[in-house]
Image: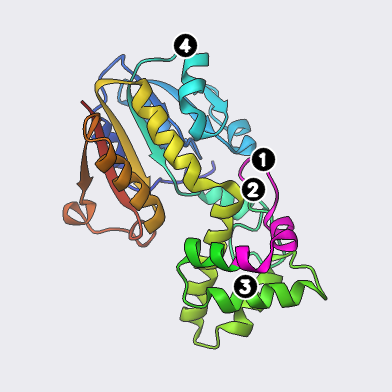
């Protein structure tokens, strides 16, 4: 039997939803279904959403999973006659299956994979790096990676593509290596930041998060809960800003899971926020 992937903040996220038996809940980022199964086991009636069609095809037969972007949560819920809901869960991380088996170049540890990184529609990272102008690439890498070497890496990408297309994970790693002359730990940090930034760019992830949060508030009943797990400072800032700008609609708190238990390594970059509709 295939071992199921345990999501980040598995128990804490579902506990924060405060599941009420027979009430409706949406897992807006289905992934491998860990949170969804827990919600159902706790007595919730569930609708799940995932932008990755491969994840939807692998979903459990007893879980209703809709293929779509979480940014369209409001229209999806309405089309499924699934409103209002008592809670929504967003987990903005990737599943291990997407990283290990997706074949889309999402991990810098898969050197032969093509630089795709698309989770839905749009252009691939390879296509983006072929077409983007120098100034736009520099600005985007600085903004979304927050890596101090971003300008130099952008310069090198522009120089390199004139003689060889940047098409594989290894192509991009070699470019980063040519700029980041340091120990392997430092290089890996730059890999992670640059790869994550490019994934964010081609999937327009931050704009989708903004739309998703508003859509969730629109379909959650008064007193309902929106649980959000972020993995990047830019994601977390969007959630904080949304809560601050919508104080008339939601209250917000951070769940300090680190005070409750020792965090696993894959959880240390994550933040769990809970929004409650007024």
Q: Residue furthest top?
A: 81
CB contact under 8 Å: marks 3 and 4: no
Q: Which numbered circle lies on residue 118?
A: 2
Q: CA distance from mark 4 to mark 2?
A: 29 Å
Residue 127 part of the magenta-drawn span: yes
Along the line of sight, the residue nearer the viewer: 239 or 84:
239
Q: CA distance from mark 2 to mark 1?
A: 7 Å
Q: Which numbered circle lies on residue 154?
A: 3
In this rendering, which labeled residue sits more in front, label 3 or label 4? 3
Q: Which residues are magenta?
A: 118-137
Q: CA distance from mark 3 to mark 4?
A: 46 Å
Q: Secondary structure at mark 3?
A: helix
Q: CA distance from mark 1 to mark 3?
A: 24 Å
**Quarter of the image holding residue 239?**
top left
> In terms of sequence position, does the residue under pointer 1 or pointer 3 come before the other?
1
For the C terminus, the quadrant is top left
Q: Position of residue 12 (x, y in %)?
A: 26, 42
CB contact under 8 Å: marks 1 and 4: no
Give the residue at mark 1.
Answer: 121
> In terms of sequence position, does the residue under pointer 1 or pointer 4 come before the other?
4
Q: Position of residue 133 (x, y in %)?
A: 69, 64
> In terms of sequence position, does the residue under pointer 4 or pointer 2 come before the other?
4
């Amino acid at each position: 039997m295939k071992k199921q992937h345990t999501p980040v903040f598995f128990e804490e996220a579902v506990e924060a939803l405060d599941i009420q038996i027979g009430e409706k809940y949406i897992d807006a980022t289905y992934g491998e279904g860990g949170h969804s199964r827990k919600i159902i086991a706790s007595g919730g009636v569930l609708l799940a959403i995932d932008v990755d069609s491969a994840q939807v095809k692998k979903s459990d037969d007893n879980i209703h999973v809709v293929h779509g972007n979480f940014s369209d949560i409001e229209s999806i819920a309405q089309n499924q006659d699934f409103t209002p809901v008592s809670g929504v869960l967003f987990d903005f991380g990737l599943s291990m299956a997407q990283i290990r088996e997706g074949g889309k170049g999402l991990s810098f540890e898969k050197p032969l994979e093509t630089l795709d990184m698309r989770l839905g529609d749009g252009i691939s990272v390879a296509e983006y790096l072929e077409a983007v102008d120098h100034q736009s690439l520099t600005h985007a890498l600085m903004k979304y990676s927050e890596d101090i070497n971003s300008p130099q890496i952008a310069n090198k990408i522009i120089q390199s593509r004139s003689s060889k297309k940047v098409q594989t994970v290894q192509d991009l790693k070699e470019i980063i290596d040519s700029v980041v002359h340091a120990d392997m730990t430092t290089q890996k940090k730059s890999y992670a930041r640059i790869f994550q930034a490019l994934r964010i760019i081609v999937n327009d992830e931050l704009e989708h998060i903004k739309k998703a949060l508003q859509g969730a508030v629109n379909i959650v009943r008064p007193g309902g809960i929106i649980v959000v797990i972020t993995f990047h400072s830019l994601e977390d800032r969007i959630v904080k800003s949304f809560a601050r700008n919508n104080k008339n609609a939601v209250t917000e708190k951070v769940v300090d899971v680190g005070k409750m238990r020792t965090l696993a390594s894959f959880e240390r970059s994550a933040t769990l926020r809970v929004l409650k509709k007024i």
